[in-house]
Amino acid sequence: MNWYADNKPGTPLPTLLPNPKLNDPALYLPGPGLRAAVDVALALGQPLLLTGEPGTGKSQLADHIAWYFELEDKPAVVPVQTTSVAKDLYYRYDALGHFQHNQHSGTALDPDELEKQFINFQGLGKAIREKKRMVVLIDEIDKAPRDLPNDILTALDRLAFDVPEVKKSYETKPELAPIVIITSNSEKNLPDPFLRRVVYYHIPTPKKEELLAILAKKMTNIAEPNQKLLVEHFDQLRGEQSRLRKKPSTAELLLWADLLVKMKFDPRGLEKSEKLSSELKDKLKQSYTVLAKTQEDLEALYQQLEL
């Protein structure tokens, strides 16, 4: 696997062969607690607020629910930013693009054409406008300004919004309200009024047995005994004795395993009864760039490899 590292100009680029199972919503494995939290949110018609380490599958739950209930559309996403305001829950208006169009065109657009070209409907706006059940993902709500969480609740109460730029209004019925999944990395506290009106669940870091079940579902091109060896090694790297400041997540385990397949790495060399060869150590060091996110953690992984 030396398309660049061997330093030979003119080497053909590799053919990208992504593993479709890594992001297949049908293969998502929610634990009993998460399944119960989804049922509570559906029964009450309240948003489901998810916390948990990055890479534990918070955002992927939205795709899984849309697949599970055979909804027509993929989840509609609200891209939360530090500058987000209430209107961004519904749509974004390309004012600059509209201005440039007016500067270069002698004719004004009618409302329908203006909406088509310069109004980009966001998560809640799409769900309300389409008037059908949809999953709406509001990702990383802790990035938002202080008022936005409460604006979300107001939006869900109202289920209607105006687009003054095109002099239009949209609304939907309560029975067609979206299924709202909200994720947070717990980087800052959320308002108490908001927390009182959501269903909350924290996705725990998967245990070794759960990691093995996930790997078995998504990496069927790795033999079962080898899957166990990879999970055992991964678990040791991030275990209690680990000196990593940012421990790798489930998502990184899957990428790491996928990379090792591409590297033609033989996991049998990881068996405790075997001493790692120099070749295997070199391949593992190369692969650790997927697991470590800082130079300090990368060096810690190298040191663990020498123990």
Image (spheres, grey):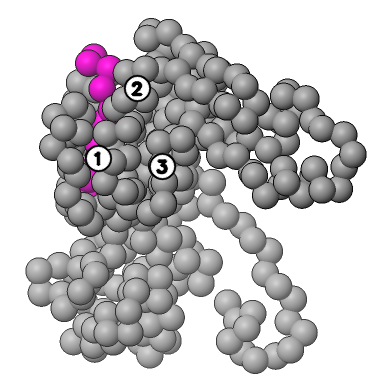
| Residue 269 visible in this rendered orientation of the protein | no
Mark 2 sits on what residue?
156
Residue 143 belongs to magenta span: no
Identify the secondary structure beneath mark 1: strand
- Packing grade of label 3 (10 A; few <14, some 14-19, many >=20) is some
Residue type, label 3 = Val
- Residue at 15% from the left image edge and 67% from the top image edge: 239
Q: Nearer the viewer, mark 1 or mark 3?
A: 3
Q: Name which residue type carries label 2.
A: Leu
Mark with earlier residue (2, 1): 1
Query: Which of the two discs, 3 and 2, labels the residue nearer the N terminus?
Result: 3
226 w.r.t. 72: above or below: below
Q: Report the residue at 67% width, 49% height from top.
A: 96
Give above or below for 255 relative to 91. below
Pick out the residue farthest to the right: 106
Marks 1 and 3 close (CB-CB < 8 Å):
no
Q: CA distance from mark 3 to mark 2?
A: 15 Å
Question: Residue 145's x, y, as percent?
Answer: 31, 48
The Cα atoms of the two marked residues, 2 and 1, are separated by 18 Å
Indicate whether 254 appears above or below 193. Answer: below
**Mark closer to the observer (2, 1):** 2
Q: Are marks 3 and 2 in contact (CB under 8 Å)?
A: no
**Could you say which disc has been placed on residue 50 in the image?**
1
Q: Is residue 74 visible in this depiction of the protein? A: yes
Q: Which residues are magenta?
A: 43-52
Residue type beneath disc 1: Leu
Picture mark count: 3
Q: Indicate the position of residue 99 as horizontal and vertical percent values.
A: 73, 46
